[in-house]
Amino acid sequence: MCGRYLTKDQRAIERELPYIDVDHWPPFDARYNVSPSQQVPVVRWWEGHYEGTMMRWGLIPFFARGVPPKYSTINARIETIETSPAYRGPWKRAQRCVLPASGFYEWHLNADGRKQPFYISLADQDVFGFAGLWDRSTGADGAVESCTLITMPANALMAEIHNAKQRMPAILRRQDHSAWLQGDAAAARAALLEYPAEAMVAWPVSTRVNSPANSGAALIDPLPGHLQTSHQP
């Protein structure tokens, strides 16, 4: 799963993803420990143009009447996005989105049972996009829009880091953003490719990231004595 990630500020995302129509995008700052249930920036194809907007991370299905489900919906497994009750509706309605990020965290299970957080980013993109789905649910307090990011089997680097579950987020290649957002179901499925391990870098970081209350650029600093590493095929 992917339960924490980083976002750049609005201007940085606009520079790196220039196709975004920001007319409807509220301003936001960089965040170094984005956590479930928070409002996060997303991009979607909406009413004939690319729109940047904010959504709750943790999908609330349209049938849930605005109430977050008791089970986790921050991640949608690629194997079940077409069949899961929570995600098959957004998939069928082509409610696909991109969650802009600059890195994410995952935890390695050590031999002693303790979990060591790692920071992972891309060597070839400063800002990239997770493939996601979104939905709108209406309850007593009105409509809420929310999203989930898709996960898939880990590549070689992520299998070493996330050794307990061997999963990773579905990271879109930049040239595949339009196919994911605008394409038909076949084109969107084809965009969900394993991101190359050799194009990713990672290093262990402080366990301070374990708490959503902690933030700031220091969270991604390597632990003393550790340099960034990448997978060598």
Image: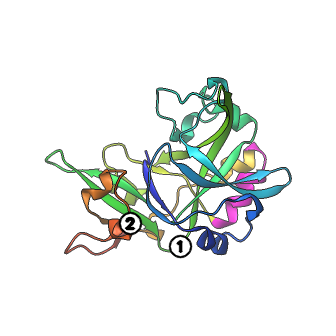
Q: Amino acid at mark 1?
A: Asp
Mark 1 sits on what residue? Answer: 126
Q: Are marks 2 and 1 in contact (CB under 8 Å)?
A: no
As drawn, the label of residue 216 is 2
**Callout 2 amino acid:** Gly
Residue 28 on the magenta span: no
The magenta-colored residue range is: 174-185
In the rendered structure, the answer to whether residue 46 lies left or right of residue 217 reads right
Viewer-closest of 194 and 15: 15
Could you say whether the residue bearing mark 1 is in a helix, strand or loop? loop
- At a point 60% along the width and 43% down the height, the residue shown is 147
**Gap between marks 2 and 1, in whole Å?**
18 Å
Observer-nearest of 96 and 33: 33
Residue 100 lies in what quarter of the image?
bottom right
Is 167 on the left or on the right of 129, as rendered? left
Q: Residue 2 placed where, x, y %?
A: 44, 48
Q: 152 above or below 229?
A: above
Q: Is residue 142 left or right of residue 204?
A: right
Residue plotted at (32% across, 60% down): 118
Q: Main secondary structure of the magenta part?
A: helix
Q: How many marks?
A: 2
Question: Quarter of the image containing the C terminus?
Answer: bottom left
Where residue 158 sits: x, y (%)?
39, 56
> What's the mark number on residue 160?
none
Describe the element under mark 2 as helix, strand or loop.
loop
The spot of residue 139 in percent (x, y) is 66, 26
Q: Position of residue 20 (x, y in %)?
A: 73, 64
In this view, the residue in front, 187 or 4, is: 4
